[in-house]
Image (spheres, rainbow, N blue to C red):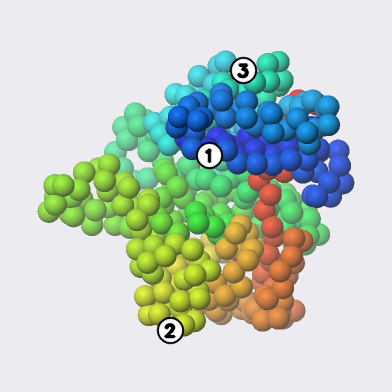
Amino acid sequence: MLVLVINCGSSSVKYQVRDTAATGEDAQVIAKGLIENIGGAEIPTHTEALHIMAEALVEPLHGKTIDAIGHRVVHGGEIFSEPVIITEDVITKIDELSPLAPLHNPAHVLGIRAAQETYPGVPMVAVFDTAFHGTMPAHAYRYAVPEDFYEQYGVRRYGFHGTSHDYVTGIAADFLGVERSEFNGVIAHLGNGASITAIEKGACIDTSMGYTPLAGLIMGTRSGDIDPSALTSVMIQNPEITAEKMDTILNKQSGLLAIAGNNDMREVVEAMEGGDERAKLALDMTSYRLAKYIGGYHVAVGGMQALVFTAGIGENSSQFRELAISRLGALGIKLDAEANLVRGDEPRVISTKDSAIPVLVVPTNEEKAIAEATEALTK
């Protein structure tokens, strides 16, 4: 089956065509691309963007047609706990969830509408970032705030990166020779956006991101966890910092960028190795926060069978993995320095044979996961 995977942002469209019947990652990916600057004079709407995409796909498809389309949708709220066939009712519900993801869900709706115009009649599936976290118990997802905050405004922990956490959980269990339903682990999805998830019996029971992707770990430009009163205090002292401005500060001007002056992990590591104290502080803070979550989630799952690193930083930064793992000695985790330096596209172990808990690096593949979910619902 040829599946077109679409990830629409407010001003961009990332796409990939996959042949789900092909063997091997290289054979599966028929074409991929990114269209940016949507909303400008040249590409005023997502419909034009998808027309450009369709034209770009003519040659690599060699006359074949798209069988189904899978859309990444950031927020499914409490409505969507698994991928669904897209109908008018589903589109309406995705749009109604926009207050929970104002930068994402409206763009997804635009992308779905544009895909309907560009590929009329082709079945489409929505795959939600939040869905995998729908198995969290109430004691993990609820906040200790007045009940109407939850009932009226939907204030609770939702979690994100769910498609990646789900995919990596399955791969890790297979790699260890454990039935997924018996796998307890901790998955660290570390990129410019970062989250960590506690897995019990193959399902999510807690995750670090919250009502929005801001909570939890220190990220490239996001603050992660912070005392809300510190923010309201600053806003009271400086009325020029509005709620909108504070939101921008926390999401786009904080994290590694605020402490080290750079949100690129590679450059921050390089600066630290060159003696930059701000870079060292940023990495100490980031690795310490991660280690605290790992320890907490080890307890939450009743003892993890594996710690798994994934995504851009998790897969590629041996230096950051070493910094984080060096803080986990109390758990009996030991890093194999040589194995940690190996890079590759396959799952691998980077801990020593006598490590109390194995540490894995498992490459994520959200596009593949979306394609597989789409095929399962439309074949």
Label 1 amino acid? Glu
Mark closer to the chain start, 3 or 2: 3
x and y percent of residue 246 in the render? 27, 48
x and y percent of residue 284 in the render? 43, 74
Residues packed near mark 1 inside 10 Å, few (<14), some (14 to 19) or many (20 plus): some
Q: Nearer the viewer, mark 1 or mark 3?
A: 1
Of helix, strand and loop, which one carries label 1?
Answer: loop
Residue 161 appears left or right of 16: left
Quadrant hosting residue 30: top right
Q: Camera-side residue: 84 or 332?
A: 84
Look at 49% across and 70% down and name the residue there.
267
Q: Camera-side residue: 138 or 42?
A: 42
Q: Which residue in the structure is indicated by mark 2?
A: 275
Above or below for 132 versus 2:
below
Above or below for 281 versus 188:
below
Look at 61% across and 53% down and name the residue there.
199
